[in-house]
Amino acid sequence: MVVNWQEMLGEAVKTLGGLAKGNPGIMEGYKGLDGAGSAFGALDAKTRELISLAVAATTRCDTCIAVHAQAAAEAGASREELLETLAVAITLNSGAAFVYSSRVLEAFDAFSKK
């Protein structure tokens, strides 16, 4: 898959701008959450952006990927740091599937005992 990330981000900003203009309360609420999530300062910008990219990968948010990839690059993140971050995201996501598989099995067993 080849994506023009700069173009996609520009289009997403336009689309989200339309949403914000149509319902300003949504943007106000989002800005409040965003501000609260970045208010502490214990983590540097690069670390915060790498965490954001791990979350974006696991939540499958292309716009989040574009926003935070740009910010991570601007914050000085290296490709090696990003690859290590993504390895953590992949491991966590596979771990979640492993754990939830036991829940699926439990639910199935509960319904099969009728």
Image (tube, helix red, strand yellow):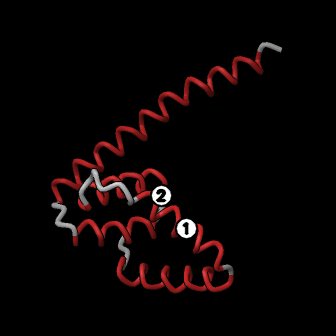
Above or below, 109 against 42 in this view is above
On residue 70, the disc is none
- Tell me the residue at 59%/67% (across/down): 29
Look at the numbered disc 1 and give the secondary structure of its residue. helix
| Rendered location of residue 112, percent (x, y) | 76, 18
Residue placed farthest to the right in the image? 114
Quadrant (top left/top right/bottom left/bottom right) for the C terminus: top right
Above or below, 88 against 65 in this view is above
What residue is pinned by disc 1? 30
Q: Depth check: 70 or 111 in front?
A: 70
Amino acid type of the residue tagged 2 in the rendering:
Arg
Look at the numbered disc 2 and give the secondary structure of its residue. loop
Left or right of 14 on screen, residue 112: right
- Tell me the residue at 65%/74% (across/down): 25
Quadrant (top left/top right/bottom left/bottom right) for the N terminus: bottom left
**Mark closer to the observer (2, 1):** 1
| Rendered location of residue 24, percent (x, y) | 64, 79
Q: Are marks 2 and 1 in contact (CB under 8 Å)?
A: no
Amino acid type of the residue tagged 1 in the rendering:
Tyr
Crowd band around label 1 with a 10 angstrom C-alpha radius: few (<14), some (14–19), many (20+): few
Above or below, 61 against 12 in this view is above
Mark 2–mark 1 distance (CA, rounded to whole Å): 19 Å
On residue 60, the disc is 2
Q: Depth check: 60 or 26 in front?
A: 26
Residue placed farthest to the top in the image? 113
Left or right of 106 on screen, residue 5: left
